Amino acid sequence: MTIDMVVDIMRAALLVVIKCSMPMLLVSLVVGLIISIIQTVTSIQEQTLTFVPKLLAIFLILALAGSFILGTVVEYMKELFSNFDLYIR
């Protein structure tokens, strides 16, 4: 196994992590921004107000994008295991 192979595996793993985490991060960012704007407009200074809407939005997006995330991880693992004989040389 060469250093180039290790770098390629790590690059692919990081891309999978980014692809799988992006839906939750974007939804959390948008919900947090909307709640912050509402807090600014209404002068509510409660710091814990953003947690419940973010949590509900993340659970909803996990329910909607769960199959995409699982499919992405399974595809990466199939590719990794199919090339296993190249890695042990």
Image: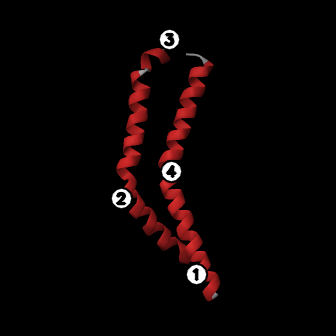
Between the residue at mark 4 and the residue at mark 3, the CA separation in whole angstroms equals: 33 Å
- Give the residue number, with chain letter if any, for mark 1: 38
- Give the residue number, with chain letter if any, for mark 4: 21
- The answer, for residue 1, to whether it is visible in the render is yes
What is the quadrant of the N terminus in the image? top right
First-in-chain label (2 vs 3):
2
Q: Residues within 10 Å of mark 3 (few under 14, many from 20)?
A: few
- Give the residue number, with chain letter if any, for mark 3: 89
First-in-chain label (4 vs 1):
4
Vertical comparison of 82 with 21: above or below: above
Q: In the rendered image, which quarter is residue 47 located in?
A: bottom right
> Could you say whether the residue bearing mark 3 is in a helix, strand or loop?
loop
Residue 80 image point, x, y percent? 44, 27
Residue 71 image point, x, y percent? 37, 42
Between the residue at mark 1 and the residue at mark 3, the CA separation in whole angstroms equals: 58 Å
Residue 46 image point, x, y percent? 60, 81
Q: Residues within 10 Å of mark 4 (few under 14, many from 20)?
A: few
Name the kind of residue labelled 2 in the image.
Ala
First-in-chain label (2 vs 1):
1
- Give the residue number, with chain letter if any, for mark 2: 63
Left or right: where 39 falls relative to 65: right
Name the kind of residue labelled 4 in the image.
Ser
Vertical comparison of 70 with 50: above or below: above
> Could you say whether the residue bearing mark 4 is in a helix, strand or loop?
helix
